Image: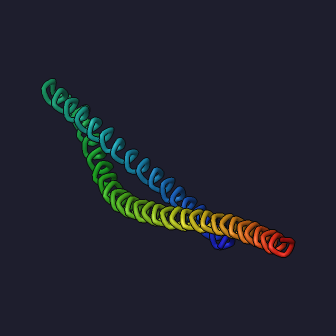
Amino acid sequence: MQPRLETLKRLAALYAAVEEMHSAELRRVTSALREAQHAIGVEREIARSARQEERGALIVGDSEGRMMAETRHETADLRRRALEHIQQEREELNDRAREQYVASRLKREQMKRVFDDIAARMGIEEGRRMQAVSDDRFLARRRWTDTQQRMRGDEEMKVS
């Protein structure tokens, strides 16, 4: 039974390693998602700033400044839309990575429960074996003592 327990122990370690690998992948994908979200925020801020510059240029009658601000605004919007597409892809990757991580975590926990259950049963069986050995010794000693007493009793009867 001990080799089986060692095999299960190695298997449990393997499941833990797989869980850690999935955890690292989830962290990596989540970080990439946050990076895309941050970049979208930056592009929104650039577009907002460009709109304000565009309004200011319009008020003062600076057509060249207005056109430059309008171009910055449109460019920021284009980059934001591209980043939103990337964000959506990364959200899907993040969801899949989370599902993988949760599944591997459940498998590791199941393996740990199986390992713990078998180890507990082996401990109980070992305790029973030790008790049986102890009981056998006690009974053997008792039989020997009883036999010795009968032999003495028989000798005493012969002598009398």
Q: Which image quarter holds the C terminus? A: bottom right
Q: Give the vertical position of 87 relative to 146 (above or below).
A: above
Q: Is residue 125 left or right of residue 87?
A: right
Q: Position of residue 90 (x, y in %)?
A: 37, 57
Q: Is residue 18 left or right of residue 67?
A: right
Q: Position of residue 53 (x, y in %)?
A: 22, 30
Q: Position of residue 44 (x, y in %)?
A: 26, 40
Does residue 86 show up?
Answer: yes
Q: Give the vertical position of 121 relative to 54 (above or below).
A: below
Name the residue located 25 percent from the left edge and 34 percent from the top edge. 50
Q: Which image quarter holds the N terminus? A: bottom right
Q: Nearer the viewer, residue 44 or 72?
A: 44
Q: Residue furthest top?
A: 60
Q: Is residue 14 left or right of residue 157?
A: left
Q: Nearer the viewer, residue 106 or 52?
A: 106
Does residue 68 show up?
Answer: no
